Image (cartoon, rainbow, N blue to C red):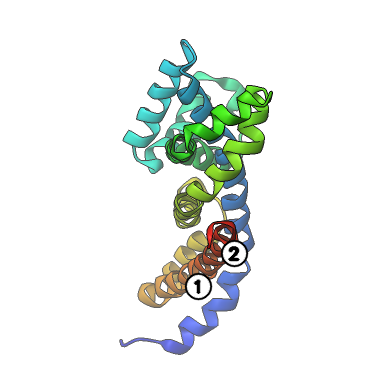
Amino acid sequence: MGFDFNYMLSLMPILLKYLPTTLSMAALGAVFALILGLILALIRIYQLPVLNALTQLYISFFRGTPLLVQLFLLYYGLPQVMPSLVGLDAFSAAVIGLSLHFAAYMAESIRAAIIGVDRSQREASLAIGMTESQTMRRIILPQATRIALPSLMNYFIDMIKSTSLAFTLGVPEIMAKAQMEASSSFKFFEAFLAVAIIYWAVVIVLTRLQQLAETRLDRAYVR
């Protein structure tokens, strides 16, 4: 049959209409994952009784099982044991699943970044009368942000690509639309290549933004 380039081009505007859904899923997931990841990292650092053990179990589970399995457990499995979740829509389930999954990875990156800040800075800030919380907010976290930024941005990029799994829950995003178009035209290669190009373009833009952010944060350390 050959490759239909014109058909692929004609799909682009159709698929791009669903890109906001994909990006909003990733953005919401990233925000929630970052907040949860920071909480988990602090629990691990301060070795809080009971919570630390639960945090390690959480991280082990979400890093040790596939994201697709976690999404199915959340959307199809949990409502059977928790009837209150029956009304959970597919978009929300996808955002929650992405948040819980990537929080486990972000927690370890944030923990490593915080530990990577020189201990002498914490000791100096405590010596001049700062509280532990003030030290963390004003001294440790700003420096840890610079250290953790590359890995956190990589997780965000990975999250954007992982939103393609949301179509298995019925979320109308670009992968779901490409599947529908390919099924009706039988031009699977063109449809999925169009999706791949869109994802690739988004990742290129985000990678450039990451480089700019790293350059800006590194200015204070350039001599």
Relative depth, front residue between 66 and 90: 66
Closest to the camera, between mark 2 and mark 1, is 1
Mark 1: amino acid: Ala
Q: Name the residue under label 1.
A: 201
Hey, which quadrant is residue 173 in on the image? bottom right
Q: Residues within 10 Å of mark 2 (few under 14, many from 20)?
A: some
Q: How crowded is mark 1: few (under 14 residues within 10 Å), some or many (20 or more)?
A: few
| Helix, strand or loop for disc 2 | helix
Mark 2: amino acid: Leu
Q: Where is residue 102 in the image (x, y as percent from the top left)?
A: 47, 41
Q: Distance between the residues labelled 2 and 1?
A: 12 Å
Quarter of the image with the N terminus in it: bottom left
* Tally of marks: 2
Hey, which quadrant is residue 31 in on the image? top right
Relative depth, front residue between 57 and 133: 133
From this viewpoint, is residue 141 visible? yes
Q: Name the residue under label 2.
A: 19
At horizontal 35% and vertical 29% (from top left) the residue drawn is: 60
From this viewpoint, is residue 87 visible? no
